[in-house]
Amino acid sequence: GAVVSQHPSRVICKSGTSVKIECRSLDFQATTMFWYRQFPKQSLMLMATSNEGSKATYEQGVEKDKFLINHASLTLSTLTVTSAHPEDSSFYICSAPRDGFNTEAFFGQGTRLTVV
Amino acid sequence: QKEVEQNSGPLSVPEGAIASLNCTYSDRVSQSFFWYRQYSGKSPELIMSIYSNGDKEDGRFTAQLNKASQYVSLLIRDSQPSDSATYLCAVTNAGKSTFGDGTTLTVKP
């Protein structure tokens, strides 16, 4: 199956600092990638749609100035959590569909962010 | 009403039994349906995809889709302890996936 690699898998940062998470499609080109957030014992909530070469589309209630998304190439999207606070601590997961817009998504390994 | 609803868990079955997981969705124009398995602390992994009405079988797994009833299910035959995980139902429209809250399955040896 297609491989989506996400890095880092785990990060602990101090409140007020910024953290960058990378999502790479290793064996296919992804014009679109999705970023999700998952709190403990809850489902995945879509944060934003990352579009190669254009601005990301954010879901309602997600602060675009806080969660910066850059999709500069067909294989890489980054999510930067700026001025992180403890309430931003969560499991962040990226995904990309390989074969078409409504086909199954391949997920990265996820990033466990802890803000102290 | 949630866009994607799954039967509340947790669900516990003995080893070798059939586990039945259910999901309903609200958007009648939905075209693509998926079941993912998620182990604690890990990302979801695809189990089954189904796009048309009827049954789709893959090994011990069978997905069933009924678009008229807006219902999709997953049956796991001969359940194994390694099947113990949270199962997420996902509905995809225009590339966006909406997930249910998940059903946690425990298969007891």
Image (cartoon, rainbow, N blue to C red):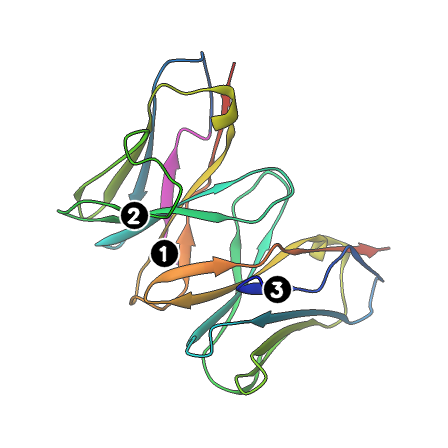
Residue underneath mark 1: A2
**Is residue A3 rendered magenta in the image?**
yes
Q: Chain of mark 3?
A: B
- Residue A47 visible in the shown view: yes
- The image shows residue B24, relative to residue B41, as above or below, that is below
Magenta part of the chain: A1-9
Identified at 52% across, 64% down, the residue is B3
Taking the image as shown, residue A41 lies to the left or right of residue A17, namely: right
Q: Is residue B45 above or below residue B95?
A: above
User: Residue A67 in the image: x percent, y percent?
Assistant: 33, 32
Residue under disc 2 on the same chain as residue under disc 3: no
**In the visual, does B68 lie left or right of A25?**
right
Dot 2 amino acid type: Ser
Q: Amino acid at mark 1?
A: Ala
Residue B35 found in image quarter: bottom right
Residue identifier under label 2 = A25
Q: Residue at x 25, y 55 (%)?
A: A28
Q: Residues within 10 Å of mark 2 (few under 14, many from 20)?
A: many
Q: Nearer the viewer, residue B49 or A81?
A: A81
Whether the residues at callouts 1 and 2 have beta carbons within 8 Å, the answer is yes
Considering depth in this image, is A44 or B35 the residue closer to the camera?
Answer: A44
Residue type pointed to by label 3: Glu
Quadrant in which residue B68 is drawn: bottom right
- Say which element carries label 1: loop
Q: Which one is closest to the eye, mark 2 or mark 3?
A: 3
Quadrant position of residue A17:
top left
x then y, percent, for residue B13: 83, 62
- Find residue B5 and name its label: 3
User: What whole-number distance in Å separates the C-alpha atoms at marks 2 and 3?
Assistant: 30 Å
Q: Mark 1 or mark 3, which is nearer to you?
A: 3
